[in-house]
Amino acid sequence: MNPPEPGHGPLGLFGGTFDPIHHGHLRLAETAREALTLDRVRIIPAGQPPHRAAPGASGPDRLAMARLATADNPAFEVDPAEVEALQASFTIVTLERLRAELGPTRPLVLLLGVDAFLGLPTWRRWAELFDFAHIAVANRPGYSLDTAQMPPALARLCAARQAPAHILHGAPGGSLVQFDMTPLAISATDIRTRRAAGLSLRYLLPAPVIDYISTHRLYL
């Protein structure tokens, strides 16, 4: 199979609160790009995430930090639309928007961790996600999705949709793939706690993001 032209190959979609964005997020996006041979990865900070409390930093601050964190990687791009929308961010609505923007044939690949995937039945119109994109689940090496841990509806969908990664290049959506991800023991919650306690954030986040947090006095 010949490689797709830039701008036409599979586009990874990585949404989240990113409160703040850190090396764990960036490593997952980079691993997915390599493992799934994605053309690019689009980072999509949520405006008002519906499944959790209000973020510790404002939408514009989280958007600015995402841009700083990804500025040195030409394969990453940041999507400001969810922050600028000033309303709850639902994944299905995001996928509808991106499909309208990018056309019906561009492969879109929604990147999720295992925990997020297992919680999929709580998401709005979750069964429709495959109408707009593929889903790629990041596993720890040596592990894979266990249908015994899933709600029955998700287990049935998983069994019907699982496919090898190369399928991402041949269809705009509809398949479930997995890739191995070595998790970094970094969490945004711990970063906010460390910041409030006056502890160092070095090596947990990109230096420009640390500088932004300090300059704007975030998470104090």
Image (cartoon, helix red, strand yellow):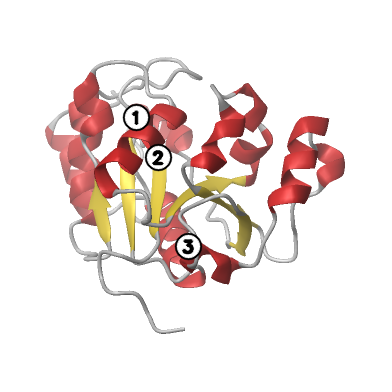
Q: What whole-number distance in Å separates the C-alpha atoms at marks 2 and 1?
A: 7 Å
Q: Amino acid at mark 3?
A: Ala
- Give me the residue at 36% from left, 49% from top: 104
User: Which residue is at the far right?
Assistant: 148
Compared to residue 45, the image places residue 141 above or below, namely below
- Give me the residue at 56% from left, 66% from top: 167
Compared to residue 189, the image places residue 185 above or below, namely below
| Residue 176, horizontal then vertical, whole percent | 62, 53
Where, by quadrant of the figure, is residue 76 drawn? bottom left
Q: Are marks 3 and 1 in contact (CB under 8 Å)?
A: no
Give the labeled residue for mark 3.
32
Q: Amino acid at mark 1?
A: Ala
Where, by quadrant of the figure, is residue 53 drawn? top left
Mark 2 and mark 3 lie on one chain; the one further toward the N terminus is: 2
Q: How many marks?
A: 3
- Give me the residue at 54% from left, 46% from top: 112
Instruction: Bin the neighbour count of mark 2 within 10 Å (Cα to Cα): few under 14, some 14-19, many 20 and up.
Output: many
**Residue 26 in view in this figure:** no
Q: Are marks 2 and 1 in contact (CB under 8 Å)?
A: yes
Q: Which mark is residue 46?
A: 1
Circle 2: element type: strand
| Residue 198, horizontal then vertical, whole percent | 32, 33
Q: Which quarter shows the C terminus?
A: top left
Mark 2 and mark 1 lie on one chain; the one further toward the N terminus is: 2
Give the labeled residue for mark 2.
15
